[in-house]
Amino acid sequence: MQPISASALTKAELPKPQYEEPRALTVPEIAKIVDKFGTAAFRCQQVGYDGIELNAATTHLLNSFLSRAWNKRHDEYGCDSLENRARIVVEIIREIKKRTSLAVTALFNGAEFGLKDGIAPEEAAEFAKLFEAAGADAIFPRVEFYRPFFDSTHFPDVYVYPEPLPNLHPLFDASNHGLGGEIPLAAFIKKGVSIPMIASGGIDPIIGERALRAGKVDFVSMNRRLLADPQLPNKIASGHPEDVRPCTSCMTCFAIGETGKTVKCRINAALGKSTLAELTADTKPASVKKRVMVVGSGPAGMEAARVAAQRGHQVSLYEQEGQMGGSLPMAAMVKGFEKEAILPWVEYLKTQVKKLNVEIHLNTKVDRSLIERVKPDVVIVAAGGVDATPDIPGINTSKLVVTGEELHHKLKFFLRFAGPKLLRSLTKFYMPVGKRVVIIGGGAHGCQTAELLVKRGRRVTIVDTENELGEGLVQEFLKPSLLKWLADKGVTLIPGVKYEEITSKGITITTKEGVRQTIEADTIVTALPMLPNDGARDLETAAAEGHAIGDCREPGWMIDAVADGWTVGCSI
């Protein structure tokens, strides 16, 4: 089970030292591998495929020959010339072309930014010429980004999270937080070949159309956006971009896939379903049309309303605030708008419920008497959870403390007059917190709040009773990146504490090592997971059929709320 590579590398030599030390392939073994690729392509043609993508990118086997960071050998497949490094890929392309009539796309690293001896764009341009000469029908360069503090990634939006590194390569465009940032590289390589050029990397329809019209590339490749909405191409082609479910770039799909589990999507609850009936349950007309009342317009409520209305039910949606979205606009304000596209998702949901003729009631608080007057056949309660306040002596009397509930109320008040983008911009000039801030709670809410505060010049300390911080952050890439960034920015991270008391000076804790200390603060903010909303759940018994969903039933994450809404919308 020892890995194979172009060269045998020690842990110290490996560009990714978490990998196992590989052994070098022999020339006869390389010949067998070339043959295996040809056989695999032949099978693809036998079962009806029109083309294949030859993956020589990221840190896969073929890339270990192309990249001098991996290739240390000195034979006909060695590092002494571009032709030798490209030889195995060229031989595979020729073998596939000899044995099939398939179209072949050559996917490879067009650059390995941040890696010593990694592939440079100029080298990639020469590789592209060699692959075209061997018979490739399209060139697909991608970037493998190496960061000094964490692994590597081929997601450009992840590369610049939480903020771009200094001295980015001029062929990488970070202006849109990395989305579409690899297009300049593809355009550079395209100059030397005559076959079609493909680009990828967080490209949406607008970015892609712009690149195509400018002649920078010939095709755009999408992955995560097609997981969020497999019908994206059809919706764009039919002139309905407003109906495209937007990818929020949260990386949930990739992180779950890396564990070997069924891939899921935060905003497309159908992804990963195993049968056609399950995949299309949200479009199956209801056998009995019902009057459905949805309480709450957060992600769970709006998704339930969308699906129920799409299936033919008569749906009314009630929201006690003056705008739809629940806590999503607040989440967007805290998270920012560069990495996660929360606001486009909110706009998508708003558009869908309106187009499906959902009756919308804003500024309307729902109680049992209202439900009894409306007399729905079904009531879906998606009123959200309730804030948790830890039991710490002094927390209810100290003027330093701003609880999560108080902060939410303040934000909701200001959101009546300013949208999330304007409100976040205004935080550059004023925030209702002091210079020294202690955040109680080191999960996703606390860490992302700390990110905002640090970017606004606050000195932050995070304390939590849990031994591991970052609960709820996406494990792959994002969690370690944010925690490392916070530490580098001077945020003090103290897990495994016991809260002792809050005084006029700050908060006193006992560390997991048993040291009692007081952390002085101007403001103490609570950022803890929500609790179930038992009061709101009582509403589900006010109709003949009732369902409590989302944080109201069991606090979780956005992906859980959407799944709840989709499931109940499909079931009624």
Image (cartoon, grey):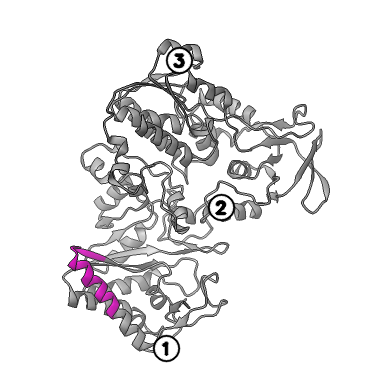
Kind of residue sitting beneath label 1: His
Residue 25 visible from this viewpoint: yes
Q: Which mark is residue 184?
A: none
In this view, the residue farthest toward the left is 101
Quadrant location of residue 120?
A: bottom left
In which quadrant of the rendered image does the C terminus lie?
A: top left
Within 10 angstroms of label 1, few (less than 14), some, or many (20 or more) residues? few
Q: Earlier in the sequence, mark 1 or mark 3?
A: 1
Within 10 angstroms of label 3, few (less than 14), some, or many (20 or more) residues? some
Mark in the foreground, 1 or 3: 3
Would you say the residues marked 2 and 1 are in contact, meaning their CB atoms lie under 8 Å apart? Answer: no
Mark in the foreground, 2 or 1: 2
Residue nearest the observer in this picture, 176 or 229: 229
Query: Magenta stretch?
Result: 35-52
Disc 2 to disc 1, how far (Cα)?
40 Å
Q: Which residue is mark 2?
A: 479
Would you say the residues marked 1 and 3 are in contact, meaning their CB atoms lie under 8 Å apart? Answer: no
Q: Tell me: residue 351, above or below residue 83.
A: above
- Number of marks in picture: 3
Residue nearest the observer in this picture, 534 or 71: 534
Residue at 42% over, 76% down: 64
Residue 253 colored in magenta in the image: no
Q: Which residue is mark 3?
A: 371
* Residue 357: percent from left, percent from top: 31, 23
Within 10 angstroms of label 2, few (less than 14), some, or many (20 or more) residues? some
Kind of residue sitting beneath label 2: Lys
**Element assignment for label 3:** helix
**Element assignment for label 1:** loop
* Residue 425: percent from left, percent from top: 53, 35
Q: Which mark is residue 74?
A: 1
